[in-house]
Amino acid sequence: MDESGQPQSGTGEATPPPEHTGPRPATDRTDTTAGRTGPGPDDARRDPAGPAGPADTGAAAPAGDHPDRPREEPRARPTPAPEAPRTPDDQPPAPGPGTGGPHDQHPERAAATSGRRKGPTKTPEPRGGLLMGRPFGVPVYVAPSWFLVAALITWVFGGQLDRVLPELGAARYLVSLFFAVAFYASVLVHELAHTVAALRFKLPVRRIRLQFFGGVSEIEKESETPGREFVLAFVGPLLSLVLSGVFYLGMRAVAPGTVPGVLLAGLMISNLIVAAFNLLPGLPLDGGRMLRAVVWKITGRPMSGTVAAAWVGRALAIAVLIGLPLLTQTDALGSRTQDTGSMDTVTDALLAAILAAIIWTGAGNSLRMARLREHLPELRARSLTRRAVPVEHTTPLSEALRRANEAGARALVVVDPDGEPRSIVREAAIVGVPEHRRPWVPVSGLAQDLTDGMRVSAELAGEDLLDTLRATPATEYLVVEENGAIYGVLSAGDVERAFVKAMARPQ
């Protein structure tokens, strides 16, 4: 901090804080999503004090304002008494970063929260609709968009049943609804195959979502080898092919032209389509991840595999946008051109546009997440840490800020008489104290008690650093050496700005 109260940079000597170059990308947290994927969310909360360190609009206390000297004021002033260290129950919570996702995953929430908390705050579990269960310990959600698709499938399949089994009457829609549920149960089995493989490789799975046009398995980390990546991607389509075979055998065992026969035939064909579609060699589809694994194996660089598979995915999106409506205008899909009405043409074009948009967006997200993963090693606790000054809990704020300015530090750590760190003076709390009150406010009243999760090793970097901060959200963290010595204070805002700066850097 300088004499005007503006913070100075430095981790020991001098490293300016990373400049803010733009909003933080939606995946502050690194996720890998198998199957037809999307980014996983992840969220970072920004310190309301902004990018600066503890602000001091009058760091050096004037002689007349020192707590040990009389002050000429018309009102009496109390002499500040030592305060006992606050317990976690007395300490208001402070916001901290969350990070999600390469895939997330989603952040930029301002956070000046009030209230009370006990102990470290756990990151809330991401939600995605209606919770259906937790197979293998992984929550399964049904997104609201699924109900729209289920209604559409019920209507379309009901029309087909009317031509095949006209004697059903209105009951055909009940059969169609059963088909829609059974089809998405097959999609769930597809996603569970990805989940089981990920858990087998010790990759954490955040959740499974059943949504518009299929399902998503949100896997939080990337496979360590291209072989595991290939297996993780291939098991989904493989299980869909197995299900298609099972439904085929079931169809052969029942009489054709009956309700069970029609349902089994529909499930056989739909699972075959799911397998074939996901094997297309473009991200974000399973086939794209398989292509990525192959290129990764050949080149030795996962980024090269991602770039190749993502651009193939974009080409695939264009092919779907143009090719699908053209196919429906011919007899290539088993329908005669003269039977195709104008409404069917519009529906086919809309379906092609939606599919193309999903594939194109997923390919772009895959590129961004790969870029994120390449830049993660640049986030190092040691290089982002602010130099800190130890002060006792009875020290007036003005005196503590004066010492920080003299030492070129940007943070305050409250220590006990033995020199052990007990709490960190919160940056946002300092800003809220007027200059004329700072000589009478002890630092203990602005400090946040340290918990185990708020002690961060100076050696942490990259994804390990983000995981540690996400486990215990806070605005500041105490950074310590391997021997327990105080290295400094890490601001969550500094980590976020370094993250944004790294992501904004050209490839």
Image (cartoon, helix red, strand yellow):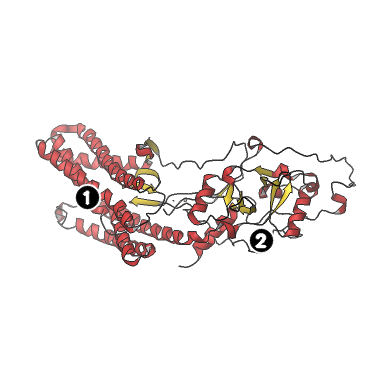
Q: Which residue is mark 1?
A: 273
Q: Is residue 56 left or right of residue 220?
A: right
Residues 317 and 18: in front is 18
Q: Which residue is mark 2?
A: 12
The quadrant the N terminus occupies is bottom right
Toward the front, the furthest residue is 483
The type of residue carrying mark 2 is Gly
Tag 2 or tag 1, which sits nearer the N-term? Answer: 2
Across and down, in percent, residue 43 comes to 50, 49
Q: Is residue 73 left or right of residue 402?
A: right
Residue at coordinates 31% horizontally, 43% vertically from top-left? 192
Secondary structure beneath dot 1 equals: helix
Residue at coordinates 30% horizontally, 58% vertically from top-left? 288
Q: Quadrant of residue 21?
A: bottom right
The type of residue carrying mark 1 is Ile
Cα–Cα gap, marks 1 and 2: 60 Å
- Residue 9 position (above or below residue 449): below
Residue 350 seen in render = no
The quadrant the C terminus occupies is bottom left
> Given this view, does label 1 or label 2 mark the residue nearer the observer?
2
